[in-house]
Image (tube, rainbow, N blue to C red):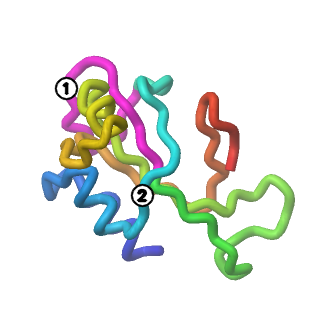
Amino acid sequence: MRERAGKCNALVASGATMNDAELALELVPPLYDCPATTPDPPPNSVCAPGPVCRFFFLYIASDPGLCGSGIGQGCDYVCEAWTTQADGALFLGGDNLVPICASQWFSKVQLCVPGQGCF
């Protein structure tokens, strides 16, 4: 997971596209928030002012060594990639070459996405 976290956090600095992220993280983001309901981008953001979209590359850990065993303890590892809203709409329409303008990694969380539930 440390390797994936490093790849996630390096997406913006490397000028990655959503396609690059899919290849590096070996996963297609199944969840998204577009337009995003959370207005505060992560510290590495180079997003232009205005509406953004958030895409979530989700890893649900099944190894008991990685996860808490109690109710309410998160077991998800998430790379969150941000795009502008215009680029996010292009991505959702099939264009995976849109640039990522912010990214961040979360460990051992429960991911809740507006309108899509908690995982």
- Tell me which label, 2 or 1, sits earlier in the chain: 2
Query: What kind of element bears circle 2?
Result: loop
The number of discs equals: 2
50 drawn magenta = yes
User: Of all residues shown, which one is farthest toward the top?
Assistant: 50
In the image, residue 109 sits, relative to residue 35, either above or below, namely: below
Which residue in the protein does label 1 denote? 48
Q: Name the residue nearer the viewer: 2 or 53.
A: 53
Which residue in the protein does label 2 denote? 28
Q: Is residue 88 left or right of residue 98?
A: right
Q: Where is residue 116 in the image (x, y as percent from the top left)?
A: 63, 36
Image point (33%, 27%), residue name: 52
* Amino acid type of the residue tagged 1 in the rendering: Ala
* Amino acid type of the residue tagged 2 in the rendering: Val
User: Of all residues shown, which one is farthest toward the left?
Assistant: 15
Q: Is residue 86 left or right of residue 107?
A: left
Q: Is residue 79 left or right of residue 52?
A: right
Mark 2, residues whose alpha carbon is within 10 Å: few (<14), some, or many (≥20)? Answer: some
> What distance separates the C-alpha of mark 2 from that of mark 1?
24 Å
Q: What stretch is highlighted in magenta?
A: 40-56
Image point (19%, 37%), residue name: 46
Q: Position of residue 94 (x, y in %)?
A: 30, 42
Question: Contact (CB < 8 A) between labels 2 and 1?
Answer: no
Mark 1, residues whose alpha carbon is within 10 Å: few (<14), some, or many (≥20)? Answer: few
Image point (43%, 28%), residue name: 34
Q: Quadrant of residue 82?
A: top left
